[in-house]
Structure formats: C-alpha cells, structure tokens
Amino acid sequence: MEAGWHERSIDWVRSGQVDASAIDSHVLVVAFRDDPGLRSDLRIIGTLGPSTIQPVAVARRMPVTLKSELRHLLLEMAEDLEPRIC
C-alpha cells in the first residue's frame, strides 16, 4: 500500500490497517514529540542510518552573498541548541 506521506503511514500502523511501514526518522521524532502516547503504540523493529539531512538546493539566480550567508547559517546550526526538537 502506498500511503503518500509518513504521517499517514504512522496512522495506518497505529490503527492496524497495515502491520509495518518505513518512516523517516525526522518525521517520527516530530510525531513522538507531538503525540507522547504514540511511543507506546509503535515498536521500532529496525533502523537504517544514521543519515545526513536532506540536501539544500537554491536557485542559480540567488545572489552570491545570500548563498554565502545561507551556507554559514546552515553550518553553524549544529552549535545552536535552541532549534533542536529532541
């Protein structure tokens, strides 16, 4: 069955509509954060990774200075604890 997005797959597993599904780890962390009861309803049976974050792409027309600022911000994010969700 093709759910179309990870959140729907989580709902299907939780409701028993399907027995298992592959879920992106980032989506699962957010789902656990938003619904603490979900942890007791699901069981992780395997993992693949860890994997890196999805690639970031920008338009060629973006000004070089803006690209540079964006690159700097993304590289410095690891040192900022505020945006972390887990």
Image (spheres, rainbow, N blue to C red):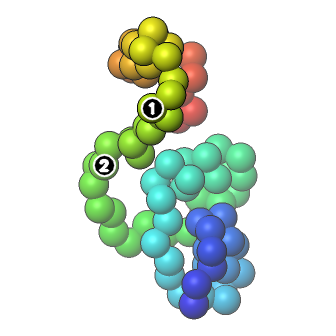
Mark 2 element type: loop
Tell me if 20 is positioned left or right of 46 in this view: right
Q: Which residue is mark 2?
A: 51
Q: Is residue 41 visible?
A: no
Q: Is residue 50 visible?
A: yes
Q: In terms of depth relative to the viewer, which is nearer, 86 or 74?
A: 74
Q: Dividing the image into 4 quarters, which one contains the N terminus?
A: bottom right
- 42 w.r.t. 30: above or below: below
Could you say which disc has been placed on residue 37 in the image?
Answer: none
Task: Please state which of the two labelled residues, at mark 1 or mark 2, is closer to the viewer.
Answer: 1
- 49 w.r.t. 14: above or below: above
Measured from the top left, where is residue 57 in percent x and y?
44, 38
Tell me if 84 is positioned left or right of 45 in this view: right
**Residue 39 falls in image quadrant:** bottom right
Q: Which residue is mark 1?
A: 60
The CA span between labels 1 and 2 is 27 Å
**Kind of residue at badge 1:** Arg
Query: Which residue is at a point 66% across and 86% down the rendered structure image?
Result: 16
